[in-house]
Image (tube, coloured by chain):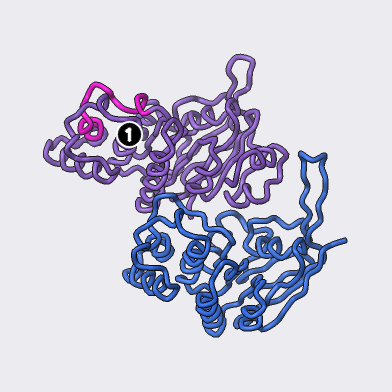
Amino acid sequence: MSVILEARGLAKRFGERPAIEDVSFELHAGEVLAVVGESGSGKTTLLNCVSGRLRPDAGTVRFMTRHEGLKELYADLSEAERRFLARTDWGYVHQRPEEGLRMNVSAGANVGERLMALGERHYGRIRTAATDWLSRVEMDPERIDDSPRTFSGGMRQRLQIARNLVTDPRLVFMDEPTSGLDVSVQARLLDLLRSLTRALGLAAIVVTHDLAVARLLAQRMLVMKGGRIVEQGLTDQVLDDPQHPYTQLLVSSVLQP
Amino acid sequence: MIRVRELAKTFTLHNQGGARLPVLQGVSLEVGPGECVALQGPSGAGKSTLLKCLYGNYKPTSGSVTVAETEVTSASDQELLRLRASSVGYVSQFLRVIPRVPAIDVVADEVRGKPEARQEAEQLLLRLRIPMRLWSVPPATFSGGEQQRINIARTFIRKKPVLLLDEPTASLDAENRVTVTAMINEAREAGAAIVGIFHDQKVREAVATRIVEMEELS
């Protein structure tokens, strides 16, 4: 399978403190990659750097664009081009859905907005697509005109996913997409994420501290500690036969990941 | 189909003072199409470890493992995923599934995209005596024996040339043991190369074309 995203030698400091150092990895089309590690290990900084939201101090992030081959996010693309990618070919699912949704407009408008970014102006088609996506994320299409403020946490998270996937992106970034939800809602969301990534052939980078989530969603996994990748490989390899002391500690600290 | 040369596996436990735990040493084995090798030996002899080295989720310390012409010890992640998808079926002792997916989909998902996927899944579930009322239920709530049969169904629905079976009949009743024994033999007769751990002597005698004895490292 072809590489869709490639990070080489990424580093970012905040003041004196390095947040990530010497981070390199590849993501293939259609692959789900989990990034695990404790709080403060640099997971979210890594995600921000590779999703065009935070310029690294060193290193490169190359993305395979639909028509123009590999482009370095910060050297080859303008801010406007990065924003356009973020609204179309990428998705970004925030841990707190309130950060990824517009809370003052209806559910349907939240979904339709991304289509309009692609130039769609036909109200009927936008509404049909929004209705369709609400049912695909198992929401009642009757709620299309309701504000996300009236939705539960799990519903908001599903709405955020619908909003991200309506433009048929090839790559989705997810920051702890299931934490903060109660266990049964989590299970439902995991199932939904897995079936959608498979059905749509999506590549995804999922930041999580939950090894069971990583085991269920991701084929491959990166383990971070102190801003560095200490181990990477197939998810079952890393979880069943961890090589690095930190990964061994992580895996032995939880029940049956 | 399967060739193992001078395989060694030692676990290093970094958080127990770097203790080293040798499990496999000097293991060599060849398994051709149509063969079923039963690994035999006491607990701790490294039977499951060997299976996991063949599947590629344990990283050998040294030696070579070739499965369906891929060198597992040096394969990239992508090559290993491809090898598993095309050629290697692995029945582990535990069933790991997404909590909410119905049993029938867990099985049919293995051949997704194929028009007759569901029909084939149904036939397997019938053959393995999973009651129809359970087909639409997620297997998380199933008994041990039922979960094991789902695990077997999802592996056998793809006719893969290499099968690795870790106690596939351990929690099955007599009737289902007979069924699974027959399925293993059918796969072997169709040309699969099989390596398995079968604690049940009757099953072992019914499926194995060769027995390999393993002993614990002293």
Crowd class of label 1 (few under 14; some 14 to 19; many from 20; radius 10 Å): many
Q: Relative to residue A8, is residue B41 drawn left or right?
A: right
What residue range appears in magenta?
A: A97-113
Q: Relative to residue A128, is residue A254 drawn left or right?
A: right
B69 relative to A185, above or below: below
Residue A110 forms part of the magenta stretch: yes
Identify which residue, B144 or B52, lies in the foreground: B144
User: Is residue B94 visible to us here?
Assistant: yes
B107 relative to A123, above or below: below
Q: Please name the residue shown 65% across and 78% down the image.
A: B204
Name the subunit of mark 1: A
Residue A176 picture location, percent across and down: 47, 33
Residue B203 picture location, percent across and down: 62, 78
Question: For residue B132, what is the image quadrant?
Answer: bottom left
Provide the residue designation for mark 1: A160
B132 relative to A148, above or below: below
Identify which residue, B80 or A62, lies in the foreground: B80
What's the amino acid at mark 1?
Gln
Chief secondary structure of the magenta span? helix
Chain B shown in which color? blue
Q: Please name the residue shown 64% across and 72% down the image.
A: B196
Q: Relative to residue A121, is residue B5 drawn left or right?
A: right
